[in-house]
Image (cartoon, rainbow, N blue to C red):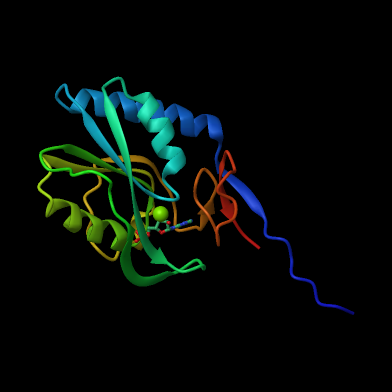
Amino acid sequence: MEATTPEPTLRVLIPAAKIQERIEELGAQIDADYPPGQLYLVAILKGACFFLSDLARALKRPARIDFIGISSYGRGKTSSGEVKLTKDLDVTIEGADVLVVEDIVDTGVTLNYLIHVLEQRKPRSVRIATLLDKPDRRLRPVEVAYVGFKIPDEFVVGYGLDYAEDYRNLRDICVLGG
Ligand code: IMP
Ligand code: MG
């Protein structure tokens, strides 16, 4: 008899409606926190794309968007520990209020590195907004100004988050098992 690999299971952790509701709250909070003016939203490819597009539309202030590519994970569920810039910003951020938009902060290795890189470019301010936070797994300190949801140490997919490039287009955030 042939051995078969079991299909991975998906359990909904945060349903789509709850994600949208929380992003509206975050948008209102960000609008209230910053003085009037333009905000530069810098999303980390690729996982943060969905969060960026919803968060940008939840803001009432003028916002510009740009993307930065960073790789710290291989194709698996654990970090390779190495961080490298795979795509840089298209614009200069000197003097700008920059809000880094991330899907999830896990070990903190990625954002700890990125914040150092961005600060060298002399923005007026730089803060982080992340949809998800797994605080139990932190290895490097990261100051996160806006958090959508704190989640337990489980591997999640959907709403931009992937496992080996799959599942990004799920509307809900799900725990991947199996
Ligand atoms: P960190 O450098 O360990 O904080 O890793 C952050 C990056 O790891 C995120 O931007 C994700 O791409 C990836 N990551 C961490 N945890 C998960 C998860 O549960 N599901 C999918 N990707 C994850
Ligand atoms: Mg990512």
Relative image position of residue 8 (x, y in whole percent): 67, 60
| Up/down of 66 relative to 113, above or below | above
Q: Quadrant of the N terminus?
A: bottom right
Q: Residue at x 24, y 61 (%)?
A: 113
The furthest residue to the right: 1
| Up/down of 2 relative to 88, above or below | below
The furthest residue to the bottom: 1
Relative image position of residue 29 (x, y in whole percent): 27, 27
Q: Exactly how many numbered labels are in the figure? A: 0
Q: Residue at x 49, y 57 (%)?
A: 154
Q: Residue at x 23, y 43 (%)?
A: 91
| Up/down of 34 relative to 150, above or below | above
Foreground: 124 or 142?
124
Foreground: 100 or 65?
65
Q: Quadrant of the C terminus?
A: bottom right
Relative image position of residue 128 (x, y in whole percent): 26, 44
The part of the image, by quadrant, that contains residue 94 is top left
Q: Quadrant of ligand 1?
A: bottom left
Relative image position of residue 118 (x, y in whole percent): 18, 52
